[in-house]
C-alpha cells in the first residue's frame, strides 16, 4: 500500500467516525434544544414545574451549558417546590456554574424547607467562594436570629453594614438585637435607622422613650425588663423573651421578669405557665404578675379563674384601666354582661384618651345593643376624634351607628374603614352583614367573598363562609 492509499483510508475512517458521532450526538442535541424551547414556553405561561423539568433535561443533553441546572432550580423554586430545587442548585455548584444570585436562592430554598443550618452553611459557602455581599450577610443574620443565636446575628449585621453603612434595615435590626442583649448600646443604631428611613420612626421612638427613661436608673435587670416590654409592644416577642431571660439571669428573684417571660413564651407558641407560677411564688402582690396570670387563664378558656387574678390586680392598682378592660373581657367571656359593662365603663373613665379602651366599650355596646345611644355612641365618637384615620375607629363607629338604627350612616363609616385598610377582613364582613340587612345581595356577596380571601382560616373567614352557604348556596 502506498502512502496515498493509506491517507485516503485514514480520511475515510475519520469521516465515518465523525458521522457516527453525529448520529449519536444529534438526537441528544436536538432534544436539548427542544427542551430549552419547552422551558421558555412554560416560563412564559407560568408553568414553573414543567419549566424546571425541561431545563433539567436540557442540562443533561447539553452538558457544556451547566448554568441550565441553575435555571432548573430557579424554576422549581418559583413554582413553590424548594425540595426539587435543592439538588439542581447542588449540580450547578458542583460544575462551578452557580451565579451569586443562585447561591442566595440556594440558601433560600434550604430555609423554605425548614433547614436553617443548611441555609446558613450554603450562604457561608458562597462567602468562601469569594462572593461576599450585603445580601448574604443580611440573610445569615436573619437566619441566626430565627435560631435564637443572637450574638452571631449581631456579628452578621455588623458585617453587612461594612458593605453599605446607610442600610437602614441593618441598623434597625442591630438596634433591636442590642435592645434585647445590651440595651444601653441600642439607641445610636436605632436613631441612625430612623434617620435613614422615616418609616421606622414610630417603632424607634417607642423604644427610645422606654430606654431613655430606664437608663436614668442604674439598674441592669430593670433596664432589660423595660427594653423587653418595649420590644413586646412592637411585636418583637422573640427578642422580648431574650431580654426577660437575661434580666432573670442577673436577678433570679425578679418576679415581674418571670411573669413577662411567661407572657412572651405564650406569644411564641409555648405554654409559659411554669414561668407565671414562679412569678406568683416570688411575689403574690404584684399587679403585673396577677394580671398576666389572669391573661393566661383567659386565653385557655377559664374566664372565672382569670377574673380572680384581674380583680386582685384591680385591688392592687385601681387606677390602671388595663386591668378594668381585662376584667371586662373575662366577665363577657363568662357570660356576665352586666359586670362586663361596669368594667368597660370604669376603664373609659380612667383612660378617657385611650382609643383602644373607648373602642372596647363602644364595641361591647354595639354587640349586645346595650346603652347604645348614651354610652356606645359617645365612646365611638371620642375614639374617632382621637384617631380619625384609623380603620378600627371608623369600623367601630359603623358598628355603633348600625346598632343605633342608622344603616346609611353605618355604611359610610364601613366604606371609609375599607378605604383606609382594604386588606382587613373585619370591615368587609361588617359591611356585608349590613348589606344583607338592607337587602343589597350582590354587594353583600362580593364583600363576603373578599372576607374569605383575606381571612380563609380565621374567624372572619369562617363566619363569611357560613353566611355564603346560608344566603348564596
Image (spheres, rainbow, N blue to C red):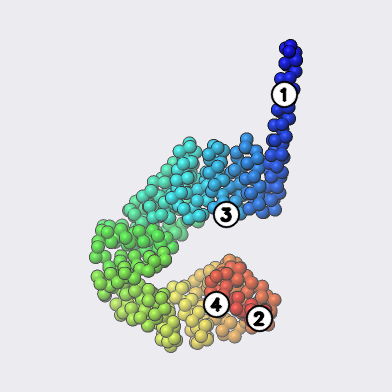
Q: Considering depth in this image, is 359 or 367 the residue closer to the camera?
A: 367
In this rendering, the answer to whether 353 lies above or below 168 is below
For the residues bearing labels 2 and 3, Cβ distance under 8 angstroms? no
Residue drawn 24% across the image and 63% down it:
252
In the rendered image of this protein, does residue 3 appear above or below residue 230?
above
Characterize the local packing of mark 2: few (<14), some (14-19) or many (20 or more) Cα atoms within 10 angstroms: few
> Sequence order check: which comes first, mark 2 or mark 3?
3
User: How far is mark 2 from mark 3, CA to CA?
Assistant: 38 Å
- At label 1, counting other C-alpha atoms closer than 10 Å, the crowd grade (few under 14, some 14-19, many 20 or more) is few
Earlier along the polypeptide chain: callout 1 or callout 4? Answer: 1
Residue 53 falls left or right of residue 264: right
Question: Going from the N terminus, do you reach mark 3 or mark 1 first?
Answer: 1
In the displayed structure, does residue 255 sit left or right of residue 472? left
The residue singled out by tag 1 in the image is: 13
Name the foreground residue: 389 vs 207: 207
Q: In which quarter of the image is the C terminus?
A: bottom right
Question: Visible in this render: residue 204?
Answer: yes
Q: Which mark is residue 397?
A: 4
Q: Can residue 420 be seen in this view?
A: no
Q: Position of residue 404 (x, y in %)?
A: 57, 85
Sequence-first disc among 1 and 2: 1
Q: Do the residues labelled 1 and 4 touch (CB within 8 Å)?
A: no
Residue 373 vs 69, above or below: the answer is below
SS at circle 4: helix
Label 2: which residue?
A: 471
Q: Nearer the viewer, mark 2 or mark 4?
A: 2
The disc label shown at residue 81, or none: 3
Q: In this rendering, which labeled residue sits more in front, label 3 or label 4? A: 3
Of badges 3 and 1, the one in the foreground is 1
Q: In this view, does 350 lie above or below 29?
A: below
Amino acid at each position: 500500500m502506498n502512502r496515498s492509499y493509506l491517507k485516503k483510508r485514514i480520511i475515510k475512517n475519520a469521516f465515518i467516525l465523525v458521522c457516527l458521532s453525529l448520529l449519536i450526538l444529534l438526537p441528544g442535541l436536538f432534544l436539548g434544544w427542544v427542551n430549552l424551547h419547552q422551558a421558555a414556553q412554560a416560563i412564559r405561561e407560568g408553568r414553573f414545574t414543567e419549566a424546571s423539568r425541561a431545563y433539567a433535561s436540557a442540562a443533561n443533553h447539553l452538558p457544556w451549558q451547566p448554568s441550565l441546572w441553575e435555571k432548573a432550580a430557579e424554576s422549581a423554586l418559583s413554582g413553590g417546590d424548594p425540595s426539587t430545587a435543592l439538588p439542581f442548585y447542588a449540580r450547578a455548584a458542583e460544575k462551578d456554574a452557580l451565579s451569586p444570585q443562585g447561591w442566595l436562592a440556594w440558601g433560600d430554598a434550604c430555609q423554605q424547607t425548614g433547614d436553617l443550618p443548611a441555609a446558613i452553611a450554603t450562604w457561608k459557602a458562597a462567602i468562601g467562594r469569594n462572593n461576599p455581599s450585603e445580601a448574604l450577610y443580611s440573610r445569615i443574620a436573619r437566619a441566626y436570629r430565627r435560631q435564637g443565636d443572637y450574638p452571631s446575628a449581631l456579628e452578621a449585621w455588623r458585617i453587612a453594614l461594612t458593605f453599605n453603612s446607610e442600610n437602614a434595615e441593618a441598623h434597625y435590626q442591630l438596634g433591636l438585637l442590642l435592645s434585647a442583649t445590651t440595651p444601653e448600646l441600642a439607641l445610636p443604631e436605632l436613631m441612625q435607622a430612623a434617620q435613614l428611613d422615616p418609616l421606622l420612626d414610630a417603632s424607634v421612638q417607642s423604644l427610645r422613650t422606654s430606654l431613655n427613661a430606664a437608663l436614668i436608673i442604674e439598674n441592669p435587670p430593670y433596664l432589660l425588663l423595660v427594653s423587653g416590654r418595649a420590644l413586646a409592644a412592637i411585636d418583637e416577642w422573640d427578642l422580648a423573651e431574650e431580654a426577660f431571660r437575661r434580666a432573670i439571669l442577673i436577678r433570679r428573684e425578679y418576679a415581674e421578669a418571670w411573669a413577662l417571660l411567661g407572657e412572651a413564651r405564650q406569644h411564641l407558641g409555648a405554654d409559659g405557665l411554669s414561668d407565671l407560677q414562679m412569678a406568683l411564688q416570688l411575689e403574690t402582690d404584684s399587679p403585673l404578675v396577677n394580671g398576666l396570670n389572669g391573661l393566661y387563664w383567659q386565653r385557655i378558656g377559664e374566664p372565672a379563674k382569670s377574673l380572680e387574678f384581674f380583680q386582685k390586680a384591680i385591688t392592687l392598682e385601681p387606677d390602671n384601666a388595663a386591668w378594668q378592660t381585662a376584667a371586662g373581657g373575662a366577665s363577657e367571656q363568662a357570660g356576665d354582661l352586666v359586670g362586663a359593662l361596669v368594667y368597660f365603663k370604669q376603664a373609659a373613665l380612667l383612660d378617657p384618651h385611650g382609643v383602644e379602651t373607648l373602642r372596647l366599650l363602644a364595641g361591647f355596646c354595639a354587640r349586645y345593643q346595650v346603652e347604645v345611644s348614651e354610652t356606645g355612641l359617645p365612646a365611638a365618637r371620642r375614639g374617632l376624634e382621637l384617631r380619625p384615620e384609623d380603620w378600627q375607629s371608623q369600623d367601630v363607629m359603623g358598628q355603633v351607628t348600625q346598632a343605633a338604627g342608622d344603616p346609611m350612616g353605618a355604611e359610610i363609616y364601613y366604606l371609609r374603614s375599607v378605604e383606609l385598610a382594604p386588606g382587613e377582613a373585619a370591615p368587609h364582613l361588617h359591611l356585608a352583614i349590613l348589606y344583607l340587612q338592607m337587602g343589597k345581595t350582590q354587594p353583600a356577596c362580593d364583600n363576603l367573598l373578599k372576607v374569605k380571601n383575606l381571612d380563609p382560616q380565621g374567624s372572619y373567614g369562617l363566619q363569611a363562609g357560613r353566611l355564603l352557604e346560608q344566603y348564596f348556596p
